[in-house]
Image (cartoon, grey):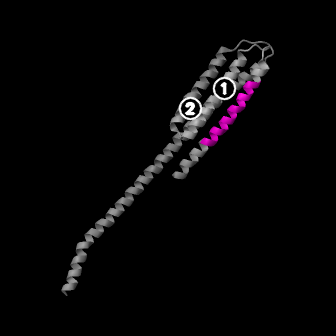
């Protein structure tokens, strides 16, 4: 009988420690789940902010490019020498500066591959805008066909950089989605 009492007493003294260990394990699991939920929420928030920045950049760059293309077409359609339209050039420059400003946000949001693709996109846009500005400042009779070819080539480079940026941005967004 004493052996049974001894085993019973020993079991009773161990039970609170076992319950405490079980509770500690459950607390750790609950805390790990909370941390994981916060991490997933942060990744979703990050993805949404990146996606908005990427989309803003594409829209701003396209606005600048459309204004630039329209001016380019008007310059090429003109057979008479026309003076450079400083107001149009200033408008295009404003659109470009807006796109450039948004590119800084994209570069901050990252990741590095997207930041680099955004910089190449802005550089290509700057080049095509510069080429059209050159056409505007070149008399129609002098080397305008050569300048037009350079602008068209820069335009194709811009389109290539736009496709590269979109692909890189999409891959970055998909990577965040797979982590969540």
* Residue occupying the point 70% across, 32% down: 157
**Lateral position of residue 158 relative to residue 17, left or right:** right
| Count of numbered marks | 2
Q: Which of these two is toward me, 130 or 77?
A: 130
Looking at this view, name the residue that lies furthest to the bottom: 1
* Residue occupying the point 79% across, 21% down: 145
The answer for how far apart the CA atoms under marks 1 and 2 are is 16 Å
Q: Is mark 1 on a helix, strand or loop?
A: helix
**Lateral position of residue 33 relative to residue 69, left or right:** left
Residue named by callout 1: 127
* Residues in magenta, as a range: 149-168
Q: Is residue 82 above or below residue 27?
A: above
The numbered disc on residue 39 is none
* Residue occupying the point 23% across, 75% down: 12
Is the magenta region chiefly helix, strand or loop?
Answer: helix
Image coordinates of residue 46 in percent, x first then y, are: 50, 43
**Lateral position of residue 81 relative to residue 5, left or right:** right
Q: Name the N-terminal-most of marks 1 and 2.
A: 2
Q: What element carries label 2?
A: helix
Residue named by callout 2: 103
Image coordinates of residue 174 in percent, x first then y, are: 58, 48
Looking at this view, name the residue that lies furthest to the left: 2
Image coordinates of residue 53 in percent, x first then y, are: 55, 36
> Is residue 72 rendered magenta in the image?
no
Q: Specify the quadrant of the image occupied by residue 128.
A: top right
Q: In this view, does 100 lie above or below 45?
A: above
Q: Specify the quadrant of the image occupied by residue 32.
A: bottom left
Q: Which of these two is toward me, 20 or 157?
A: 157
**Lateral position of residue 65 relative to residue 141, left or right:** left
| For discs 1 and 2, the disc positioned in front in the rendered view | 1
* Residue occupying the point 50% across, 47% down: 44
> Is residue 159 rendered magenta in the image?
yes
């Amino acid at each position: 009988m004493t052996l049974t009492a001894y085993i019973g007493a020993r079991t009773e003294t161990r039970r609170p420690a076992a319950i405490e260990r079980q509770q500690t394990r459950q607390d750790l699991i609950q805390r790990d789940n909370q941390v994981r939920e916060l991490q997933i929420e942060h990744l979703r928030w990050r993805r949404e902010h990146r996606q908005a920045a990427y989309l803003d950049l594409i829209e701003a760059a396209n606005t600048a490019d459309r204004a630039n293309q329209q001016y380019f077409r008007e310059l090429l359609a003109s057979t008479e020498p026309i003076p450079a339209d400083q107001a149009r050039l200033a408008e295009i420059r404003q659109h470009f500066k807006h796109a450039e400003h948004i590119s800084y946000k994209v570069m901050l949001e990252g990741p590095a591959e997207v930041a680099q693709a955004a910089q190449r996109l802005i550089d290509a846009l700057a080049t095509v805008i510069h080429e059209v500005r050159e056409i505007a400042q070149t008399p129609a009779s002098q080397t305008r066909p050569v300048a037009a070819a350079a602008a068209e080539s820069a335009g194709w480079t811009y389109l290539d950089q736009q496709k590269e940026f979109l692909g890189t941005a999409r891959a970055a967004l998909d990577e965040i989605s797979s982590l969540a």
